[in-house]
Image: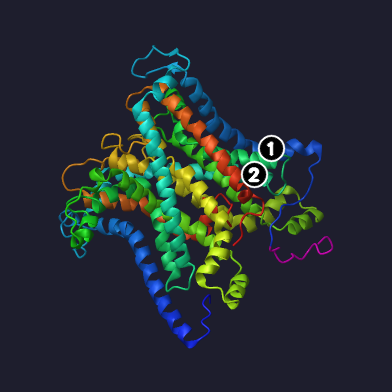
Amino acid sequence: MTTSTSTVAPPAVETRHVPVRPPRRQGWLRRLPLLPALVFVVVVTQIPFLLTVWYSLQSWNLLHPGTKHFVGLRNYRTIFSDSIFRTAIGNTLLFTVAPVILSIVIGTCIALLLDRRVFGRGVLRTLIISPFLVMPAAAALVWKFTILDPVFGMLNYVLKPFGVHHVDWINTHSQATIITVLTWQWTPFMVLIVLAGLQSQSQDILEAARVDGAGAFRIFRSLTLPHLRPYLELGILLGSIYIVQAFDAIFMITSGGPGQKTTNLPYYIYEVAFRAFDIGRASAMGVVVVIATIVIATLALRLVSSLFSDEGMHR
Amino acid sequence: MRRAGRTVAGNRSGLSTRLVLGLITWIIVLIFFFPVFWMALTGFKHEQDAATDPPHFLFKPTLDSYSGVWDRGLRSYLEHSITITVISTLIVITLALPAAYALSIRPIRKWRDASFFFISTKMLPIVGAIIPVYVIVKNLHLLDHQLALIILYTAMNLPIAVWMLRSFLLEVPAEVIEAAQVDGAGVLRQLRSIIMPIVRPGLAATALICFIFAWNEFFLAVNLTTVNAGTVPIFLVSFVAPEGQFWAHLCAAATVACLPVLLAGWAAQDKLVRGLSMGAVK
């Protein structure tokens, strides 16, 4: 390469970063480009987390100014004896695990179908990603009224031949409603990830297996599925990180109800902080959520840390 | 391509399976797409056609609902959304490109730790920070002010942009940069004449991803803004419990809210998975 400086070599197929060792004195110069982004993220995202811990040790209600004082761990005792908080924990698990599992299963099926030669593949791909792109708050309202309305909703109209009459889905099946909308929204995400995995599979190996007489199911089980594993893990990890924070659909469709049936932690914290203005108690809940997330994310990340290697996963 | 029917019978059953599977694929995809289609369609209805039993598929289209929501103030919310997302995306790219450079082309020591720090900030749920953020924004008198969302959306998207850009920069062939260095090209010239042309598509895709996330964001917007800086989803909140007939108006507003991101997402389709996986899947 050093001899042919004027001609550009054909782009290398594999990626790698330049293996230059930085001389010590240049260290800060090298770090300089990183600093603005790093400082920005630390100031805006990390300092609030530390403040949340501090706030959680205070008795502090914005509706009673001047009464703020240090109470130690009292807020934590309050929230753990709060039955709504425990309900919200359960609902958060339900509204994370169920949509993640459903969307990864349905998404894998759709990806397998789309990976075949099918008429209009480009159009199908464009259509299937749309539920993920539309604004979740807008989609939630469209579902709430035009699809799930007990009188004029599309779902009841479609199910009428099957003997379903004017079911008030949102009130009688509130949890299933939230799970359905979240699954609908996140399935395309899983399709994209699994499809990327399928398209990175070596065609030669599949062909060889076929020549050896392996059936389609056998090929899927012993070749495709192991190959897809890191992609599935990545989909589950990223899906969980985002879906655990689900708020838009709950706010728009059920407002956490009926009762507390669809109140998850983000929604409950929102209610305590911005309806009751109980800063101390809401902060304590925030701290619990963050600790739980760190524990779960650390375990999950260790599991899939190989995915974020330099090489990435190639098509 | 995938199917290797070796006998005539195998071929025939192969063809019919393919047709059936193709049909199933279309049906499933159309079911998933239906709410989006129905939203767009209902937006063009008169209110008396919007909520009917049975639903009307054929009707006289109208733009009444669009002009209706426009007059009800959608316009100013749209302006806030555009200002906030565009400015925050520009800041994100300005900050993320040098950072990604320091983590890929000329990696600093401990670049791995720095990279994982960025990604770890995305794992912390926003509810863990919202209360201090609200108090700080309130004390700075920035409640219902566009600047607050610009800063927060920038911080929200920076980690994604750094990781995504880094994955694009890693694709710049090492030999090309070495060659430029041997030629005596300085860092700025390398950036301008070698790195930028190669990563420009990646830069565009990164910007689109950041735009999509910022445009659709709701939690921060609903807690920190109302009328003066409210983004489009805040306008939609007025439809949560409205009175009278409103479905056509709702769907018109929702279509306007979704259209920019749908177009951006369709345009960035082949890079979408890379952005969503923060560069892990290429």
Q: Of the residues shown, which amino acid type is indicated by label 1?
A: Leu
Cβ–Cβ under 8 Å for marks 1 and 2: yes
Q: How is the image coloured?
A: rainbow
Q: Is residue B52 left or right of residue A82?
A: left
Asked if A79 appears above or below B215 in the picture, the reply is above
Q: Residues within 10 Å of mark 1 (few under 14, many from 20)?
A: some
Residue B234, percent from left and from top: 33, 40
Query: What residue is shown at x 17% (from left), y 48% (from top)?
Result: B245
Q: Residues within 10 Å of mark 2 (few under 14, many from 20)?
A: many
Q: Chain of mark 2?
A: B
Q: Between A86 and B173, which is closer to the camera in this rendering?
A: A86
Q: Position of residue A127 (x, y in %)?
A: 39, 62
Is the same chain shared between marks 1 and 2?
no
In the picture, measured across the screen, residue B62 lies left or right of residue A60, that is: left
Residue at screen point 32% across, 27% down: A275
Tell me the residue that label 1 is attached to: A32
| Residue ID for mark 2 | B98
Q: Secondary structure at mark 2?
A: helix
Q: Amino acid at mark 2?
A: Pro
State whether the magenta stretch is mostly helix, strand or loop: loop
State the residue at coordinates (59%, 56%): B200
Q: Does B135 lie within the magenta span?
A: no
Q: Chain of mark 1?
A: A
- Pinpoint residue B265: horizontal percent, then vertical percent: 45, 56
Whether residue A266 appears in this view of the structure is no
- Viewer-proximal residue among A193 and B52: A193
- Above or below — where is A206 with respect to A109? below
Whether A9 is among the magenta residues is yes
| Figure quadrant of residue B117 | top right
Is residue A193 among the parts visible in the rendering?
yes
Tell me the magenta residue range. Answer: A1-13
